[in-house]
Amino acid sequence: MPPRILRNILAKLKGRGDKNLTRIQRRRALADLAWRTYPRLQLLLFAIGYAWLLTIPSTLHGQRTYIDENALQPGQVNTYWNWADVHRADRYLEQLESMRDRNASSHETATFISNEFRKLGIPASTQDYAFSTTSGTVSGTNAYAVLSSPRASGTEAMVISASRLSLTGEGDGTLNLRGIATVLSLAAYLKGYSLWAKDLVFVVSDGYLDGMQAWISSYHGVTQGNLVAEPLQLSSGVIWTALNIDYPGHSFSHLGVFFEGLNGRLPNQDLINSFQVISRFTGGVPVLVYDHFDQSEFPDRVPDFVPKWLPQGMRRNEATQEYAYRAQNVMRHIGYQARGRASGVHGLLHQFRIDAITLFAVPAQGPHGFHAIGRVVESTLRTLNNLLERLHASFFFYLLVGPATFMKIGAFLPAPVLVGTAMLVGGMGAWAAARWARQGRAQGQAEKREEGRDVPAARWIERPRPVAPALSVIVYTHALGIALFCLCTWPGILAGGNIVATLLFASVALAAGGGSLLARAPAGSTQAPSWMILKSFNLCLASTVISVTSVLNFSLAATLAVFMGLPLSLSAPSRSAAARLTKFTLYALLALGWLLFVPGEAAQALRNWEVLRVWFAPFVCIVYTPLVLQAGVVCLLSP
Amino acid sequence: MIETLPLSLLLLLVCSICSAKESFSERLVLSPNLDGTVTASFAFTTLLEGARPRDPAALAEEDDSQHYTLFPLALGQILRDNAITELHLTLNAGKWDYQNWGYPEEEGVGTGAELWAWMGEGAVQTADERWKNLRNALAGLFCASIGSLDEQRTTSPALTFQPEGDLPLSSTTHALRHGTLPSERVCTENLTPFLKLLPCKARSGIATLLNPHRLFDADWHGMGVHVRYLEGAGIEVRLAFQAVLNPVRYSGDKKRDWSMTSLFDRSIERSCPVASSSEIAVRVPPAGGAITEPAPLARHAGFAVYDVKHVDKPIDVGMRWPEETQFEYSLDAPQSALMIRRRLSGSDQYKGQLSVVLTNKAPHEVKTSYLETMPWLLQFYLHSLRVVCDGIPRDDLVSIVSYTPPVPHARPSLLQAVLTLPANSTVQLTMDVVKPFLRYTEHPPDAQRGWDLPPAVFVPLGANATGAARLRRVYTPVLLVDLATPDFSMPYNVIIMSCTLIALVFGGVFNLLTRKFVVVALAPAAPADT
């Protein structure tokens, strides 16, 4: 027998009398409750979702990183990289610097590098390539070498790469000569060992990202419309892991890890964790996330990333500093991942299921140099050499808030999903609201005087909800987005300066505004107002987009949640034409503002689409912009 | 030597009592290569004179008792029990570099394990049953996983794998069974049973040099067991070991000088008393500059020959290049007459493309046979086979001899073709492939590794080739294919997810089936309908 209190509750829930009757009544009561409380529920979900987003950098979340794959055994080997190898790297560097000083062509440098590989007895070759983009042709020459390991079948390979340009300033022209010298000297050194179970592929790619894109596409036999690349003369097996070495300065104090790949893909976390362990314990080099210094290393200094406007006491507070440090890492991560950008050359390899990271030697006056980076890379390669399978044990979805602290997907995913759910609730509420209307205000007031309980259901009238006009607006705006994207890919449109951008903005906004004619309801109709139906569809669609994106690319979903969550939920027409127009203009600015305010960003996104197939630019044009424009159209329609 | 002499006399005495005469000979060929490495090919041959393979028709009857002195008994029993006429087993590690190392002494250099056998038909037990027994017996004998060369990997490519000896005429037809296991790793546990089959083990004679510490540190190593029947001579067993050693890597000063002590960490101190012949041949590079030590007994056809039948003092053959301070690799990759590259491209989990690029450097046309024995893990679209010669489509250059399509979960595919390579040309052959979906029980424990695919085998045909007596096989490197793999680290999630789905569907259907629909009158006092 259950306790009495439980029985009472059950009896209350079950009710007395006919069981079926009470069930139907209960159901109706619940529906009633949902109808009455949905605006509050929506608000609550929004509040929790946004608050959750804000707590991501706090110490509430996060745990220490750990190695999941037992085969890796990082840092368990003796390294033999020594001063003779450092000396050889210095010799290579001298030669590379002299080539830089006499302005050697890219082809000449690549030939030099490939000849140096051959002198070491490693088969090497060069590859010419050219990308044609709307902003001109990008061409260059890659050099690469394939060291077949003794006794290995050559079915698996590891890549050690260095791009000609460093990732400093996203390829602003800083040369990565020391990175190349490291790769060359490593090649000579690694050939002397018989313990490699996988082939070692050395790649010195031209340019910043373009060279590696050409090389890796050719390696996998993938053709790209605007790329002309020489087929590779040498090949190896399936590439599992890759390390990209970026060493732009004279010396370095820390090794930074860059890991974001194209379209928001991340490498398996075991790779980052192994490198982190090895760098710290074998190489004696502290690790950073990107090039952000951890405030705990400089306890007396208030780091720059803590906002200046905070009171002095708070600025000196450890918790604030930790929050600001983590927030900085998360924001940088979101900046890369949401835009689908690779944070370094390694990111291009992720598209072919290669786990890769960039080791960035953070430029400093000291104390580390070739000796430390050589040991770290050697030991990391030894660890990767231990792999019997692809890296699969650890996480593929994570937020690295510190070099050894991370968040699991469960800790950050709910934030955008809650915002998405709030929008869904709002959309479904709008759908239900479109069906029911009170029968005239006067009548309603008259009825109000009567007893609330006895109000007859008849004061609500049911309205038909035609979906065709709303759907046609949706299809129209998305078609407009496709047209906008095609226009943007025309040569010279985005490079045309402010006037062209303003014209484009105005014409697209006008065309979208014209879309409101599609949903214009005939005067005096008894149908549901089309703005309600459109809003309902718009919210449901946006919610779906956010929820689906959240499991593929958290950063993009979070950004969308911020940009679309509340704004789309607030769309509603006004009585005055001026207010309507103002609202529409605001939405148009939210949808298309990137044309006016960040033209450089837009051009970069488009270039990434053309060269690297990053779908951020088409996504914005075809999904994001139309969704916000639909909200604008909602405001234009008659209330 | 003095102590072993009476023993060998005794052995000879025992030998003469036996019905069949046996003879054992050993030979080592050492040849320096272009990239500073040294290929060492050991061959230990035992001939059972006058013997014949067992007649498969007599398999049901009790076999005659077998007495061997030199011939390996463990192997002999397997051969008799299954009536095997010819047998070739190779276990190799590494990929053979034909360009730098030239053509190998032992031609079976495909990565991993390869086993092929010719056997007479007409027995009570079918050829397939005996093939299975043979696999399992050899797997036990050599500690290798040859047992898993099952029906899914067994083919009969008779065009490429012609018998190396003779097939007994009296017997009925002979069948070939062939299988490769590219993922087999070869190590000391395979060498130990191999050495046990030798009459002198690794104690004396050339086999002394088989030092596992050095052999398994080589750039390439492989062992082979070859049994063939020679009409008029008898049954021959050749145990072969081949290794490519890298003195440049071993030496601190990057020189390519080598000696037996530097390569194997051993020298020959005693001869094998039962060996009828025992010789070491060192190929002297034609370029000159090399000094072979000690002075050889004889030189012929570019080889310096040493007899190790009688050893007075430890023999340590070596070669020096006194004028070199350091070995210099040549800048241009060496070119062999026929260069083959095979690749599997495409990053898709479903589709891919198999491409083979053949470069014929010879000034004349070359015909070559082409063999693909592919497990059903990769299925060919034969209609998409395209041949491009120096950028021009030339589908006429390929003619398909036979094609056996795969049967999923059961049988591999077999493609035999003949390619014509025009003089001084590069021929590219491409074919679309699909990767099938595996049952979850078919995935190996290391599911995320992918699947190793066997090498393709080419046999250059034609009279105007080098004029070698027999056609020689050329192996391509093996491939690795990634098939769609479930995330095995999350079985519980999968189970929970599917159970939830089933429960939802079942619950809904059950509810609808058992529910009775009636009209219920609501009391007017019910809450307002909104």
Image (tube, coloured by chain):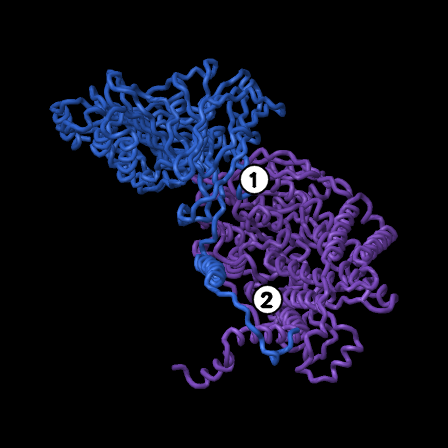
Chain colours: A purple, B blue
SS of the residue at dot 1? loop
Task: Name which residue type carries label 2.
Answer: Pro
Q: Look at the image and tell me whether residue B257 can be seen.
A: no
Which chain is home to disc 2? A
Task: Name which residue type carries label 1.
Answer: Gly
Mark 2 crowdedness (10 Å alpha carbons): few <14, some 14-19, many ≥20: some
Q: Look at the image and tell me whether residue A12 can be seen.
A: yes
Percent position (x, y) of residue A212?
A: 63, 44
Mark 1 crowdedness (10 Å alpha carbons): few <14, some 14-19, many ≥20: many
Q: Nearer the viewer, residue B380 or B516?
A: B516
Spatial separation of the CA atoms under disc 2 and disc 1:
36 Å
Percent position (x, y) of residue B519?
A: 55, 69
Percent position (x, y) of residue A58?
A: 61, 72
Q: Nearer the viewer, residue B133 or B212?
A: B133
Residue wearing tag 1: B346
How many numbered badges does the structure rendering display? 2
Percent position (x, y) of residue B505?
A: 49, 59
**In the drawing, does residue A67 fall left or right of residue B122?**
right
Q: Is residue A266 above or below residue B142?
A: below
Q: Is residue A356 above or below residue B223?
A: below
Which chain is home to disc 1? B
Marking on residue B431: none
State the residue at coordinates (53%, 44%).
B349
Residue wearing tag 2: A414
Tell me the quadrant of the picture where the C terminus of chain A can be found: bottom right
Circles 2 and 1 on the same subunit: no
